[in-house]
Image: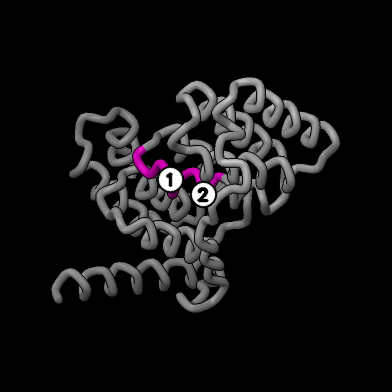
Amino acid sequence: KKSLQKMATSKEEMKCAALAAGLDWESDDSEDEVPEPPLREPPLPDLVKDEEHCNLILDLCTTLTSLRRYSEALEIIKLTLKVAYKTLPAEKKENFRSLGAQIALNINDPSGFNFVRHLVKQHPRSINAWNCYYRLVSRLESRLSKHYKFWMRLGQKDLVPPRIIYGNQFTMISQHQVAAKEYLQAYKQMPENPLVNLCAGTA
């Protein structure tokens, strides 16, 4: 009960800070993400087990990218990683993720942000995934509420990267007190991290 009250208080403080800075704070029920449909059995389950087929899919995505058909390329990458996650070699997984992140960072299409958000969901402990997410978030208009709701949906409140991101976003709108709280929580979890120390020390 105390934990729920603390979370509600923290959320209310962040909402007040965002509103004071002239930002729009959306309700939790607005613009929620559409849940992904359950994964179906692929029609060709062994397709990506063959290295030649994997390379063909990668080439297809690269070609779609060169044709500026970014959404289609990202959708194929996302589906390939989802369907063949257990069978793809680690090197191939990294190739698909790297290509997807590269596309996402070079476009302003919403599909880019959706892909990176999906990447973070799949790998919430990956610093590279959060770095990519932060680079995209920094490029967008400040939408603190959406970042907060996304973080809450991950269900892992001990993650340090989203706290740093949240703190940075509040620092950018001069809400230093709220930012300092996020940096302090991050410091409690990772006191030896140089970046966390820098953020906490300058808050």
Within-10-Å neighbours for mark 1: few <14, some 14–19, many 20+: few
Return the residue found at the far left: 2
Residue 4 relative to residue 52: left or right: left
Return the residue found at the far right: 67
Q: Amino acid at mark 2?
A: His
SS for dot 2: helix
Which residue occupies the foreground of this view, 52 or 101? 52
- Residue in view at x 17 percent, y 69 percent: 3
Colouring scheme applied when the structure was drawn:
one colour
As drawn, the label of residue 167 is: none
- Residue in view at x 52 percent, y 66 percent: 35
Determine contact: label 1, label 2, CB under 8 Å.
yes
Q: Amino acid at mark 1?
A: Gln
Give the quadrant of residue 102: top right
Numbered circles on residues, count? 2
Whether 171 is drawn above or below 50: the answer is below
Residue stretch rendered in magenta on the structure: 116-125
Residue 90 relative to residue 65: left or right: left
As drawn, the label of residue 122 is: 1
- Residue in view at x 54 percent, y 39 percent: 81
SS for dot 1: helix
As drawn, the label of residue 118 is: 2
Q: Position of residue 137 (x, y in %)?
A: 56, 48
Give the quadrant of residue 8: bottom left
Magenta highlight on residue 77: no
Q: Quadrant of the C terminus?
A: top left
Q: Position of residue 12 (x, y in %)?
A: 35, 74
Which residue occupies the foreground of this view, 195 or 54? 54
